[in-house]
Each structure stands twice: as structure tokens, then as C-alpha cells.
Amino acid sequence: MKIKLLCVGKNNRSVWHESVDDYIKRVNQFTSFTIEYVTEGKTGKKSIPEVIKKEEAKKLLLKVSNDDMVVLLDEKGKSLNSITFSKTINNLQKNGVRSLVFIIGGAYGFSDQIYSRFPYKIRLSDMTFSHQMVRLFFCEQLYRAYTIIHNHPYHNF
């Protein structure tokens, strides 16, 4: 199964970047994993959030194919613990999902078009984090999921 993390925002070389790269390498020991970025909508004093979300939705939809299973990383999503997340990943693989795309939205979240097209949502926490931190946390949890699936000692059972 190929997994892609699709992010709205820049690939800025934050303090988190080295750790994200490390987890990308770790996950790729188990499955194909990449991160792609789309530019965020232009913001300013006169910016309208709905317009920005629609602009970002157009860019996101260009990066998703009809064959992709898409999961939104969203504050309105279902909360999963690490074991349940690993079981979800494992079940998707066993059920023949070939391409899984997780999406992190922009500063204003997702447009209604994205929500209606992709109803499956999960959240990483009840707290709010910067997009750079969310990327790192997601990559770590994906790696943890694969170590659970493969009975690797990284996750203490």
C-alpha cells in the first residue's frame, strides 16, 4: 500500500523537519510513504476564510485520484489510540486498499466540498498544534502503527 500525507502549507525547514525525514525513512521500511505539499490560500486583512478554503480545495483535489482512500486529519474527526490506528491501517491493507492519502488542511480547515467528498476523519489530539508539529506527530504515529503491526519492540505492549 502506498501512503501519502498531503499538507496545505509550505515545506519550510522548521526545527521539526529533520525528525519528519527520519520517520519517513522509518515508515518506508514497511511501506511506500511520501509527503506532498500544496500552497496555502493567500491570507491578509481582507481575506475571506471560505474563499481561501475553496482555493485550497481545488489544489488538494488535483493531488488526489479516484482510486485513493482519503482520510482527513481534522479536529472534528474520530479519536483513535495507537493500537486502533494500527488495526485500521492493517485492515485497509488486508482489504486491498492500494493508495491511502491523509490530508492536513490549511489554517481555516477544509471546505464543505472536501468534507462532503471525503467523510472519513480522524484527529490526533483534542489540543491544537502547529501544522509542522502535526506532520511530525502523524509520521511518528504511522511509524508506530507499522511497528505494532509487525510486533516490533518500538511500541511497548
Image: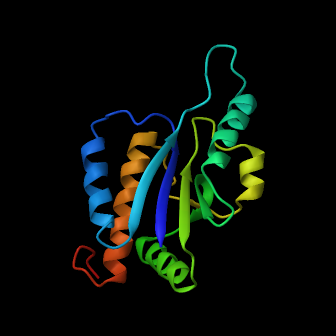
Looking at this view, is 113 or 134 the one in front?
Answer: 113
Left or right: where 157 falls relative to 99: left
**On the rendered structure, is 28 left or right of 81?**
left
Residue ranking furthest to the top: 45
Looking at the picture, tell me which residue is in the foreground, 103 or 83: 103
Q: Residue at x 72, y 50 (%)?
A: 114
Residue drawn 62% across the image and 62% down it:
70
Q: Position of residue 80 (x, y in %)?
A: 51, 69
As drawn, is 129 to the left or to the right of 151?
right
x, y percent for residue 126: 52, 53
Image quadrant in which you'd find residue 29: bottom left
Q: Is residue 48 above or below residue 148?
A: above
- Could you tell me which quadrant the C terminus lies in? bottom left
Q: Position of residue 78 (x, y in %)?
A: 60, 64
Vertical position of residue 22 compared to residue 62: above or below: below
Residue name at image x 57 percent, y 32 percent? 40
Toward the left, the furthest residue is 153
Name the residue nearer the viewer: 14 or 29: 29
Front in this rendered view, residue 33 or 51:
33
Quarter of the figure with residue 53: top right
The scheme the figure's colours follow is rainbow
Question: What residue is drawn where x is 23% and y is 73%?
Answer: 154
Decide: is 141 above or below 20.
below
Image spot of residue 73 (x, y percent): 56, 55
Total labels: the figure holds 0
Residue 69 placement: quadrant: bottom right
